[in-house]
Amino acid sequence: MPEYDKDGFLIVSETYSCEHFEPVPGRLFCMKECWYCKWSDFHKNLKSGNNDSSICRYERHE
């Protein structure tokens, strides 16, 4: 069952992938995983050290 944060965004792991994947522009390496997806916020968590989960900001995610 999917989990959502307090703002209603889907919580994802770095290896999760879905049909809404779009690569982060300008990345040299890309795999079809949330870590490399433009909709995830993993890149914003780098300073906090929390890299094992993030949220998906795809606006039509259910």
Image: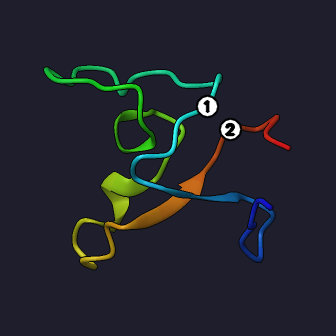
Image quarter where the C terminus lies is top right
In 3D space, how far apart are the residues under numbered discs 1 and 2 (Cα atoms)?
A: 11 Å
Q: Position of residue 8 (x, y in %)?
A: 81, 63
Viewed as shown, does residue 22 lie left or right of 14?
Answer: right
Viewed as shown, does residue 25 lie left or right of 34?
Answer: left
User: Residue at 35% across / 60% down in the picture?
Assistant: 44
Q: Are marks 1 and 2 in contact (CB under 8 Å)?
A: yes
Name the outermost residue toward the left: 28
Amino acid at circle 1? Cys
User: Residue at 76% across / 38% down in the picture?
Assistant: 59
What kind of element bears circle 2? loop
Q: Which residue is mark 1?
A: 18
What kind of element bears circle 1? loop
Corner quadrant of residue 29: top left
User: Residue at 50% across / 45% down in the picture?
Assistant: 16
- Return the mark for residue 40: none
